[in-house]
Image (cartoon, grey):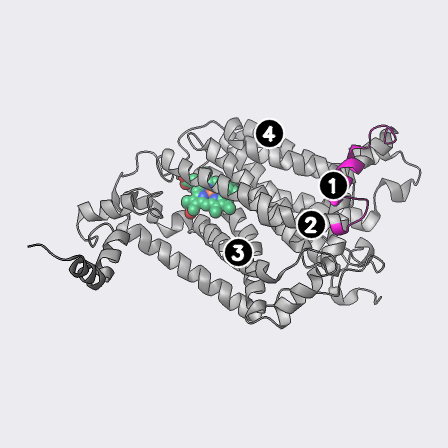
């Protein structure tokens, strides 16, 4: 039968829903093994995951879904960030007012800003927890060493992305945090000053000027930080994230104990159901938190009225605490060694057979506990000593600066962590135990120093048990 063009057109119009659905969903309802495999292979968003998933991966007590939580928080941050960009203007004259408009005028603007802020800062906590999960289940060992390194890059990017966002509202918090951060960037000046070579080779000053686009925070700084925040850092983060997920597949899925049953299930629907549950929980958590807790916004940035105490955002206050002892040791050497130490863990501990086992068994649990208590005691003692009795400069005002750079609480802490880890290796004969000691002390140091910097430091970086004891100013 010869149909006219109009007939064909009418039929196509009638079938448009069905033909659109068929072009979108290329596989039949995934109820058989074959169609479940097909849906995972044919869907762009699902194909990064395997057709089958090992049942160990689905045990909530193995991953706690922490990597996924980090990913979903990034997703919420990205969506809310794109919406914020519609109103935000990165100029020193307008930035503050646009953020104020977003907070008080724009429909749902305050909620979007809160979601962006809390999901972003939530990432810091969950990425750290995810790293701890990966570490304590020995999941950095062969063949996953490289993915551990990619993870370290993701960790750094998460921190720097948060920090760059903190600067954008251009309020007093942003401005004085910028001053603190630019001083940390300048830390090596302490060393060049002590060596008397600053007039010829001021690398710290150069780095600070490059970051600020001048000598003090201003127009050029804000546009630089904005470019970092919305362009360079997200691009890098998404590239590294792509590599991270690709490597998980290439490394044979998630780690699991050697010799454990290779039992697997179809990813559709078991894995997807678990992922959807984590997604819903994350969304609910972020929305509820953002509904009740507002992101802070102080007065507009004013270079003439310093904040006292001028503080970096909370996740960098551990660093600021160390910088208060020695800029060079606290701002460059200690964090540099911490990152290097973390990155080298899979290459210095080459023992096999630990993957997939929490703490590598009883000995690892004991090592972690001992390291936690020893680390906490030594660091608390060190901090209490400096707070109570001061350091070299308080006892001998004319002491050469180079001596303070070489011997100070930040340096002593780093040396203690290194020596303790080496001692554990010697005592147990296991590099894995040494790694557990090192990593545990890194976590203890980060948490304790952050707590001290956040809660116990007041005006002029003096120690106070309570904020209510701060002198009024
Ligand atoms: C933006 C930050 C990150 C995101 C979104 C992310 C996401 C993920 C996800 C979804 C997984 C699958 C398993 C799970 O949920 O635990 C995973 C696995 C893994 N991640 Fe991350 N990750 C991030 C940062 C890190 C960091 C900081 C490290 C370590 C330094 C790391 C190292 C690993 C390793 C080695 C695996 C494989 C673990 C295994 O085989 O058991 N990741 N990551």
Which residue is at 43% across, 29% downward?
142
Residue tagged by mark 1? 185
Looking at the figure, which quarter contains the N terminus? bottom left
Query: How far apart are labels 1 and 4 at the CA level?
Result: 31 Å
* 1 or 2: tag closer to the N-terminus: 1
Of residues 62 and 201, the one nearer the viewer is 201
Please say whether residue 208 is one of the residues in the magenta stretch. Answer: yes
* 2 or 4: tag closer to the N-terminus: 2
What stretch of residues is rendered in magenta?
A: 197-219
Of residues 381 and 116, the one nearer the viewer is 116
Callout in the foreground (2, 4): 2
Q: Is residue 146 above or below residue 307?
A: above
Query: How far apart are labels 3 and 1 at the CA level?
Result: 27 Å
* 3 or 2: tag closer to the N-terminus: 3
Residue tagged by mark 2? 223
Number of other residues with Cα within 10 Å of mark 1, as a class: few under 14, some 14 to 19, many 20 or more: many
Residue tagged by mark 4? 422
* 3 or 4: tag closer to the N-terminus: 3
Which residue is at 64% across, 32% downward?
418
Which residue is at 45% across, 59% downward?
282
Residue tagged by mark 3? 77
Please say whether residue 123 is one of the residues in the magenta stretch. Answer: no
Which residue is at 48% across, 63% downward?
285
> 385 left or right of 70?
right
> 16 left or right of 400?
left
Callout in the foreground (3, 1): 3
């Amino acid at each position: 039968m010869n149909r006219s063009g109009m007939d064909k057109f009418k039929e196509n119009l009638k079938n448009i829903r069905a033909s659109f659905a068929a072009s979108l969903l290329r596989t039949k309802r995934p109820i058989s093994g074959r169609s479940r495999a097909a849906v995972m292979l044919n869907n762009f968003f699902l194909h990064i995951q395997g057709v089958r998933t090992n049942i160990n991966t689905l045990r909530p007590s193995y991953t706690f879904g922490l990597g996924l939580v980090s990913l979903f928080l990034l997703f919420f941050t990205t969506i809310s960030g794109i919406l914020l960009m519609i109103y935000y203007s990165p100029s020193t004259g307008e930035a503050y007012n646009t953020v104020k408009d977003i907070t008080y005028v724009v429909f749902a603007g305050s909620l979007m800003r809160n979601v962006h802020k809390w999901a972003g800062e939530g990432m810091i906590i969950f990425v750290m927890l995810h790293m701890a999960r990966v570490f304590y289940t020995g999941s950095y060992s062969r063949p996953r060493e490289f993915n551990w390194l990619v993870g370290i890059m993701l960790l750094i990017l998460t921190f720097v992305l948060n920090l760059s966002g903190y600067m954008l509202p251009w309020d007093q918090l942003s401005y004085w945090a910028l001053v603190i951060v630019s001083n940390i960037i300048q830390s090596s000046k302490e060393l060049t000053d002590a060596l008397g070579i600053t007039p010829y080779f001021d690398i710290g000053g150069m780095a600070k000027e490059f970051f600020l686009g001048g000598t003090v925070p201003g127009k050029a700084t804000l546009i630089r930080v904005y470019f970092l925040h919305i362009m360079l850092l997200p691009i890098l983060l998404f590239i590294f994230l792509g590599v991270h997920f690709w490597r998980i597949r290439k490394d044979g899925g998630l780690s699991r104990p050697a010799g454990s049953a290779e039992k697997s299930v179809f990813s559709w629907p078991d894995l997807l159901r678990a992922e959807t549950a984590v997604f819903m929980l994350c969304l609910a958590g972020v929305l509820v938190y953002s509904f009740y807790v507002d992101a802070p916004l102080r007065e507009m940035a004013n270079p003439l009225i310093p904040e006292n105490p001028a503080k970096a955002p909370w996740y960098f206050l551990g660093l600021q605490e160390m910088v208060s002892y020695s800029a060079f040791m606290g701002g460059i050497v200690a964090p540099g060694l911490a990152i290097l130490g973390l990155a080298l863990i899979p290459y210095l501990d080459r023992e096999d057979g630990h993957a997939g086992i929490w703490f590598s068994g009883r000995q690892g649990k004991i090592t972690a506990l001992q390291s936690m208590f020893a680390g906490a005691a030594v660091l608390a003692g060190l901090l209490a000593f400096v707070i109570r009795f001061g350091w070299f400069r308080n006892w001998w005002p004319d002491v050469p600066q180079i001596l303070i750079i070489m011997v100070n609480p930040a340096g002593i802490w780093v040396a203690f962590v290194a020596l303790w880890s080496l001692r554990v290796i010697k005592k147990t004969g296991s590099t894995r135990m040494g790694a557990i000691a090192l990593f545990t002390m890194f976590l203890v140091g980060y948490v304790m120093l952050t707590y001290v910097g956040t809660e116990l430091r007041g005006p002029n970086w003096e120690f106070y048990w309570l904020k209510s004891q701060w002198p009024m100013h």
